[in-house]
Image (spheres, rainbow, N blue to C red):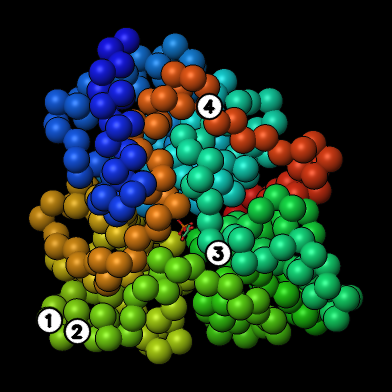
Amino acid sequence: MNMDVLTQQSTQQKGHAAGANWRNPGAHRSQADTDRLMNQLIELKKKRNAVILSHNYQEGALQDGADFVGDSLGLARSAQETDAEVILFCGVHFMAETAAMICPDKTVLIPNMAAGCSLADMVTAKNIRDWKKKFPDGVVVCYINTSAAVKAECDYCVTSTNGIKVIEQIPKDKDILFVPDFYLGSYLKAKTKRKIHVWKGYCPAHQAILPENIDRLIDDHPEAEFLMHPECGCTTKQMHLADKVLSTEGMVQYVGKSDAKEFIVATETGILHRMQKFYPDKSFYAASEQATCHHMKQNTLENTVLSLLNMQYEVKVDPALAKRAIKPIERMLEIV
Ligand code: 13P
């Protein structure tokens, strides 16, 4: 295997870490280098009997090299269904951890262990145990953006696709404790009219989308439909303006069904790659160019190739912890 491209890229990645174009890790790459890396990836995938799963926020080249691209729920389902021996997870750590718990007999790799989740880090297992003391009969619902240690303390897991459905299964008289995303929790509370107590976590990438961004884009593109992810910090002020509140995959699917030709997209900017690729005759406007997840961008085409080459970095969950943490995930997967 020709390692020149990788050696050269890892030098450039030092620049990336030092503040070069981290929002677009592929910006420095020539088409010839991209093609070479893609060929290496295809070769290694066969050799390792691996499947590559990519979240919608990954850089475009990674999405193009993946076997499946989707949202958190779709990725969890793909992990559940694959018969490959190795799952190379191009996403953030909690997603790979979820796949490792769903598929304990497979090797789950992530290209860069630094691909964490600021939102998931905003609640700990101890926080939940302490909170539950105040609501001993409460039902704890966690967003999938949580660590295995947190999931182990919870009753149900949800994603941005299925939160309403899952919450509707919980007996009506129960208090619900929702962690960690304040905006998704508030959205679910408004939609289900349930007694939901909401943790005050947030996603910094979505928080970067400001109400004035939305107002300006709506003024500039009055024909555009406004699609919003429920993690958006603008939820409370701008939710009434949204044509649809959807998961990342929900947004991609919706664009295909809609007659509209223009869309304002309020989520992480990586999703525009797939939208533009699938629907080249439609126009997409990022609600904010600042809405970029620096964790997701830790995975690059270069370190994804290295991941399969060196079988690094394996994501494992202690079996005793996994036994508890898988329960809320399994309950979710049974419902939806
Ligand atoms: P989706 O499940 O909608 O892709 O969202 C995952 C996520 O982490 C959003 O920040």
CA gap, disc 2 to disc 4?
Answer: 44 Å
* Residue ID for mark 4: 312
Q: Amino acid at mark 3?
A: Leu
> Are discs 1 and 4 less than 8 Å apart at CB?
no
* Residue ID for mark 1: 220
In the rendered structure, the answer to whether residue 315 lies left or right of residue 31 reads right
In the rendered structure, which disc, 2 or 4, sits on the residue that comes first in sequence? Answer: 2
Q: Image point 40% across, 81% down: which residue?
A: 234
Q: From the viewer's side, name the closer residue of 28 and 301.
A: 28
- Image coordinates of residue 52 in percent, x first then y, are 44, 31
Mark drawn on residue 216: 2
In the rendered structure, the answer to whether residue 212 lies left or right of residue 168 reads left
Q: Quadrant of the C terminus?
A: bottom right
Label 1 within 8 A of ligand 1 by Cβ: no
Q: Which callout, 3 or 1, points to the residue nearer the camera?
A: 3
Q: Amino acid at mark 4?
A: Gln
* Above or below 225: residue 166: above
Mark drawn on residue 163: none
CA gap, disc 2 to disc 3?
Answer: 27 Å
CA gap, disc 3 to disc 1?
Answer: 32 Å
Quadrant of the rendered structure where residue 314 is?
A: top right
